[in-house]
Image: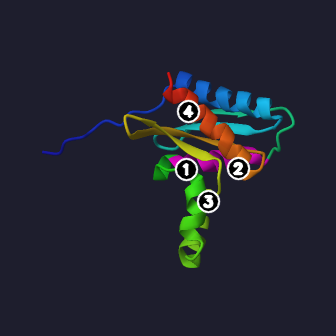
Amino acid sequence: MRKVQPKSSLTLEAAQFLAQTAIEKATALGLRINAVVVDVSGDPLVSLRMSGAPLPARDFAEKKAYTAAAYGWPTSRWKPLLEARPVITAGLTQHPRVALFAGGMPVLVEGQVVGAIGVAGSKEDQDEVCAQAAVDAFSLQ
């Protein structure tokens, strides 16, 4: 007999909180970003775009969120892992939903991935600061 373990996932309300918190952090820093929150499967729940944020950044934010949810770690972790691995890098970049640069953060509850947030529109480190602020605020609730 097979046993199935249910996967927990973010609620819409939690996703809205995460995206809005990232937007608030960006506002405080004077940035214009896109914030996308995905569920545990990497499917979008919420997408917010600040006025003046670059239009293409929305797709990058979604890819960052998907990647963080799929792999369970911040997307900034990819750069040092792939520096000396061009074949793996080339393979991963062929996936249409994967982003290998900073700005995506998994959302964890009791050590389990329940979703992720992706932020894009600024410099990578600024995107990551906004995503991290959202995850930190979420974990305090």
Which of discs 4 and 3 lies nearer the camera? The answer is 4
Return the residue at label 1. 74
Principal secondary structure, stretch drawn in magenta: helix
- The quarter of the picture where the N terminus appears is top left
Residue 27: give x, y in percent of width and height.
Answer: 79, 30
Disc 2 vs disc 3: Cβ atoms closer than 8 Å? no
Which of discs 2 and 3 lies nearer the camera? The answer is 2
Disc 3 vs disc 1: Cβ atoms closer than 8 Å? no
Q: Quadrant of residue 23?
A: top right
Return the residue at label 2. 125
Q: Going from the N terminus, do you reach mark 4 or mark 2 first? A: 2
Q: What residue is rendered at 59% in x and 77% in y?
A: 86
Magenta range: 56-68
Type of the residue with mark 2? Asp
Q: What residue is rendered at 73% in x and 45% in y?
A: 126
User: As drawn, is 55 to the left or to the right of 84?
Assistant: right
How far is mark 1 from mark 4, CA to CA?
13 Å
How far is mark 2 from mark 3, CA to CA?
13 Å
Q: Going from the N terminus, do you reach mark 1 or mark 2 first? A: 1
User: As drawn, is 53 to the left or to the right of 70?
Assistant: right
Which of discs 1 and 4 lies nearer the camera? The answer is 4
